[in-house]
Image (cartoon, rainbow, N blue to C red):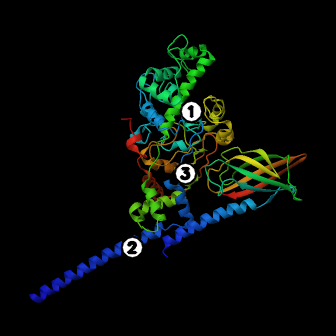
Amino acid sequence: MIGKANKLGRHKIGLLILLVCSVFLVLFIWRSNYSQFVDWSSEELEILQSLWLESLPPLSPDQSNAIVDSTAAAKLGQQIFFDSQFSINGEISCATCHQPQLYFSDGLNKAFAIGQTARHTPSIVGVAYSPWFYWDGRKDSQWSQALGPLEDPKEHGGNRMQYARLMGSDESYRIEYEALFGNLPDFSDESIFPVNAGPVQNPEWNAAWQMMTEDNRAQVNRVFSNIGKILAAYETRLMPSETRFDAYVASLLDEDNDLEPSLLTMDEANGLRLFIGEARCIECHNGPLFTNNEFHNTGLLPSPGELPDQGRTRVLQLLLEDPFNCYGGFSDAGIEQCTELTYMRTNRTELLGAMRTPTLRNISATAPYMHKGQIPNLAEVLKHYNQAELALIGHNEAEPLALSRRQLQQIELFLGTLDAPIIDSQVWGQPPL
Amino acid sequence: MNFKHLSIKLIAAIYFLFGTVSAISAEEVWASDGGSFNVSYTSKLVPIPINQIHQWVLHIESTSGDSVSGISIELIGGMPLHDHGLPTSPVATEYLGEGDFLIEGMRFHMMGEWEITLTLSIDNLNETVLIPLRI
């Protein structure tokens, strides 16, 4: 009996040793496989570093907005951004569509405020780095962009006279505005400054605007443009923070740690390799914000029942004629500083159907996708690029990729590593306290 | 030395080389198709960045080595493999003397192979120069 017990004990010890060895073997193989798949060439490492958030240079202040760096302006802009008084019905604010919890997008195919707009709400995190704004880039500064929705009948639906008067009639706003820009004009005489006026679709408001003297219109325009500059001072603060991908690159570049396997799974790392290689995503989604902020036709279908969107081509002349562009009298920049506008691309054929490349930071949290929200999820987006069919108008710059389903899944998994809150989200990512 | 350490050192070497390559590119000379001009360029930002508008200086001289002035310069560019042009419309804005011309509005928005085509016109001459470069 004792001999049998000893024999059983030896069996157990043997099994235990076998188990431990197996665990080590599995760990060894896993580790070897990880190393095999995620060893990066020096050229690839250089590309990864170019995507790293640490590589993002400090933002050059917008020369056309003299108050863009002012913290007081940013805080005032934050108040206005979340204030639904800045709408015709008192119910719409910038945050109606640019919702902080959705990285300042809205989760809808097309934005819905007073009514449904023509396009999808893009995230505005990090967009201050772009020379162009809106999907088609029809504005050349963040402050000028901010003015558009305020007067769009399907967005805030109001008019510039209404907003200029509000800055004076609200005591808190008036004090803060005047601290930044000096005294507001006296808009109290409604025979000179109508209650509602602006060069907008509403015929009554438009007629009232045309009846005003040029000098009085300029006074209103000055306050209106300053509201845009205040909003831009806030929106400039909405910047992305370090993601799991950034931590991974930091670890790759740090000789003193070896944390990579804990930061990206093998599938995610392989997705990243595809992203910068075979899948060619990096051609447009380059740099630390994963966007070149340029315009590309990628053969997107229009929304059902709609004609194809002409995109960048349609707005080239509008940009040059915009009184709130960099050249205009309300810009704080000298003409020589308006380099992007001066040397902008004007090839209408090449830009037909082209839209601005969006950032991919927080992309998995900002569905649906594309300028009309045509594509509901990232898997379908990747499928779209994998097929790269002919464009309905213009020329699809993308080419078929012939990636496998597995590879597409890996890219999608990688894109999920780009999520992170905005910088100082407790300060800027919510209504002012 | 493990692979990671080697890779980091290689990155440093590549950064050095890229800067050097750009500097060498600036020293290279391209002849016009008619053989009348030699052209070199220098980017004011080295290495040439993506997504950043910047200036170049073109140096143009005759094949006999004389500086050229009073010449009309048209610059276009693009990525032949992608079938698209530059994201900007650069312009020669100023003659800087001694055959140097300031080009404003240069910007590249993708990494890869680019081509810059210059059309040089003076008197009855009209010649082109093709400058390939990798960003």
Callout in the foreground (2, 1): 1
A75 to the left or right of A65: left
Question: For the residues marked 3 and 1, what is the alpha-carbon distance in whole angstroms?
Answer: 23 Å
Q: Are marks 2 and 1 on the same chain?
A: yes
Residue A152 at what x, y percent from top left? 52, 26
Q: Amino acid at mark 3?
A: Pro
Q: Position of residue A100 (x, y in %)?
A: 41, 39
Mark 2 sits on what residue?
A29
Dot 3: few (<14), some (14–19), or many (≥20) neighbours within 10 Å?
A: few
Please tell me whether residue A393 is drawn above or below residue A180 in the rendered image.
Answer: below
Q: Is residue A99 left or right of residue A400?
A: left
Q: Quadrant of residue A217?
A: top right
In the image, what residue type sits under mark 1?
A: Ser
To which residue does mark 3 refer? A57
Mark 3 or 1, closer to the camera: 3
Against A208, is B24 above or below?
A: below
Label 2 vs label 1: CA separation? 57 Å
Circle 1 — which element? helix
**How many dots with numbers?**
3
The residue that disc 1 covers is A144
Question: In which chain is the residue bearing label 3?
Answer: A
Residue sitting farthest toward the top:
A191
- Same chain for mark 3 and mark 2? The answer is yes
Q: Quadrant for residue A410, please give it.
A: bottom left
The x and y percentages for residue A78 are 44, 34
The chain holding disc 1 is A
Tell me the amino acid under the disc marked 2.
Ile
The residue nearer to you, when weighing B43 against A17, is B43
* Residue A214 shows up from this direction: yes
Please state, as top left, top right, bottom left or bottom right, where the C terminus of chain B lies in the image.
bottom right
Of residues A301 and A113, which is closer to you in this image? A113
Marks 3, 2: nearer the viewer: 3
